[in-house]
Amino acid sequence: MSGWATAGLLLGLIVVATLGFNLSLWMRHRSLAAAQGGWSGEDFDRAMAERGVAPDVSAAVRDELASYYMAGLAPRPDDDLDGVLRMDPEDLGDIVERLFDRLTLPLPDQQRMLPAMRTVSDLTDYIDRQPRSA
């Protein structure tokens, strides 16, 4: 097989793999949308308010997670960060850091580890429990 044929084959495999990944992502979001049954950002904010979460924290978390949802979907408190959103620990750390910055929360000691956060609710509760600067 010539070099051009090999390169073409590899390029074709990359295109097929990319299309397959995007299709699986689209199908996962479609099933999530069907399961949510019209859940909105206002529903999320209301659910968080019922748990005693500050409105600015709820809105900030919802905005930070927006890129993990298809347009028109909003986070649900029980959405699994790993299973539903496929968020790795590094992404979660980046989101927490942006939330601290956005809400002007004092950064915790660099040596302190993030607690285990399994759901969107866990993330929201963690951010809401942080001491506010005066």
Image: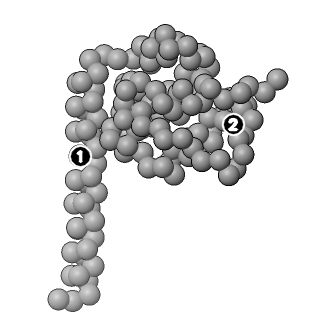
Q: Position of residue 34 (x, y in %)?
A: 23, 24
Seen in the picture, residue 33 relative to 1 is either above or below; the reply is: above
Q: Position of residue 15 (x, y in %)?
A: 26, 62
- The part of the image, by quadrant, that contains residue 75 is top left
The residue wearing badge 2 is 101
**Is residue 69 in sight in this rendering?**
no
Disc 1 residue crowd, few under 14, some 14–19, many 20+, Cα 10 Å: few
- Please identify the residue farthest to the left as the structure is shown: 1
- Please identify the residue farthest to the right as the structure is shown: 134
Amino acid bearing label 1: Leu
Disc 2 on helix, strand or loop?
A: helix
Residue found 37% across the figure and 43% down from its top:
82
Q: Position of residue 80 (x, y in %)?
A: 36, 35
**Is residue 99 in sight in this rendering?**
yes
The residue wearing badge 1 is 23
Disc 1 on helix, strand or loop?
A: helix
- Answer left or right for 58 relative to 110: left
Q: Position of residue 101 (x, y in %)?
A: 69, 36
Residue found 28% across the figure and 44% down from its top:
25
Q: CA distance from mark 2 to mark 1?
A: 34 Å
Amino acid bearing label 2: Asp
Quadrant of the image containing the C terminus: top right
Quadrant of the image containing the N terminus: bottom left
